[in-house]
Image (spheres, grey):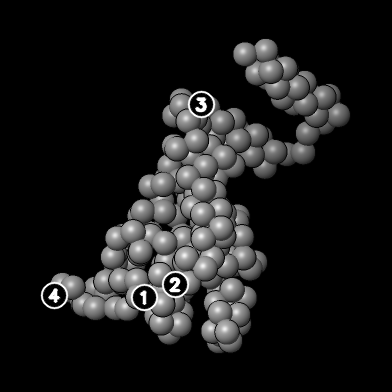
Amino acid sequence: MRDFKRFLHGTQRGEHGDGLSGGREHHAGPRGGRGGGRVFGHGGLRFVLLQLIADKPSHGYELIKAIEERLGGRYSPSPGIVYPTLTLLEELGYVSVDTADGGGRKRYTVTDGGKDFLAANRETTDEMMARMDGGVDGAGPRAGRPPQVIRAIENLKLAMRMRLAREPLTEQQAHEFAAVLDSAAQQLERI
């Protein structure tokens, strides 16, 4: 039971560097840049990693890429978040590790304890996987959003950030800026 509480609350060795309790996770921007934000919420990445390993034994890099792929390239957890979380899963007995290749890369496999933990927490795990399938801001590839729409959203966000990062808007510019956004919202409601 103590291990379960550690797993959920990340108290082992100050485990708050998993990006899920105030740390930074990384989102790939339209040009591949990165910015901060939260995708899974506190402890969620642990459930996602464990479920992905249960689905298919994997190396850490493969897990990072699987998450990035499922989120349409808009989010990629950093190795500094993933590998400590995998170590915690191993310490808790939820995954086992073997070296599958000559390069010394660790391959993670779910244990019976990990399967039991997933079964006991099926609702939370399913919620985290559904959140990932929906994508960041609900715009993932599995959410049925056409790629051209996702691209246009990202272009708009970038244009707004770039303009707001320059000199402050005058009163007139602020009204024009807001009018453009209001007009776009109204047009979208009519589609």
Tag 2: residue type? Asp
Q: Residues within 10 Å of mark 3 (few under 14, many from 20)?
A: few
The residue tagged 2 is 116
Which of these two is toward me, 56 or 164?
A: 56
Where in the figure is residue 154, as x and y percent of width and height? 54, 34
Q: Does residue 100 appear left or right of residue 158 in this picture?
A: left
Q: Residues within 10 Å of mark 2 (few under 14, many from 20)?
A: few
The residue tagged 3 is 149
Q: Secondary structure at mark 2?
A: helix
Q: Nearer the viewer, mark 1 or mark 3?
A: 1
Tag 4: residue type? Gly
The residue tagged 4 is 102
Report how far apart the C-alphas of labels 3 and 2 lie in the structure: 40 Å
Q: Nearer the viewer, mark 4 or mark 2?
A: 2
Q: Does residue 166 appear left or right of residue 120 in this picture?
A: right
The residue tagged 1 is 112
Q: Is residue 155 above or below residue 11?
A: above
Q: Are marks 3 and 4 in contact (CB under 8 Å)?
A: no
